Amino acid sequence: MSARQVAVVAVTLTGVGFLAGCAQGDEVEERSFVDQHGRACAYVLVVDREDSGDDGGPPDLDVGDVDCDYPPSPFPTGGARP
């Protein structure tokens, strides 16, 4: 994970915690995957088990801040020339 992705995830987790007002029963997780195009993607998952109700239904899930980046190229790019 690049330094940019780490920074985005750190800010996102902090923002989700403060802005969403996470209750005691909330769980905040960072998850990642590689999509069909080879991009590395990360997102934040908030699981609210208290909203599942008294009937034991599924927890309330909220996904946000999806960020996908292509991996670095193994070949140097042309860059600017004088």
Image (cartoon, grey):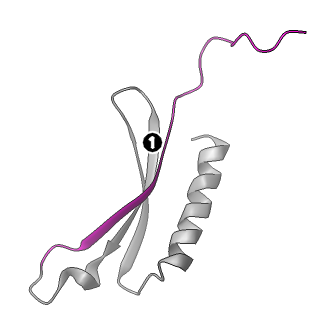
**Relative to residue 21, is residue 60 depicted above or below?**
above
Q: Is residue 25 magenta?
A: no
Numbered range of the magenta stretch: 57-82
**Relative to residue 16, is residue 69 depicted above or below?**
above
Horizontal placement of 77 versus 25: left or right? right
- Which is nearer the eye, 8 or 80? 80
Pick out the residue farthest to the right.
Answer: 82
> How far across and how far down the image is residue 68, in percent?
48, 40
Q: Mark 1, residues whose alpha carbon is within 10 Å: few (<14), some, or many (≥20)? A: some
> How far across and how far down the image is residue 43, in percent?
44, 53
* Location of residue 34 by image quarter: top left
Q: Residue at x 12, y 82 (%)?
A: 56
Q: SS for tag 1?
A: strand
Number of numbered tags placed on the structure image: 1
Tell me the kind of residue under disc 1: Cys
Q: Is residue 72 magenta?
A: yes
Q: Residue at x 38, y 26 (%)?
A: 37
Q: Quadrant of the C terminus?
A: top right
> How far across and how far down the image is residue 13, in percent?
54, 66
Q: Residue at x 41, y 86 (%)?
A: 23
Q: Quadrant of the N terminus?
A: top right
* Location of residue 79 by image quarter: top right
Q: Residue at x 56, y 78 (%)?
A: 18
**Relative to residue 28, is residue 70 depicted above or below?**
above
Which residue is the site of mark 1? 41
Principal secondary structure, stretch drawn in magenta? loop
Pick out the residue farthest to the bottom.
Answer: 54
> How far across and how far down the image is residue 50, in percent?
27, 85
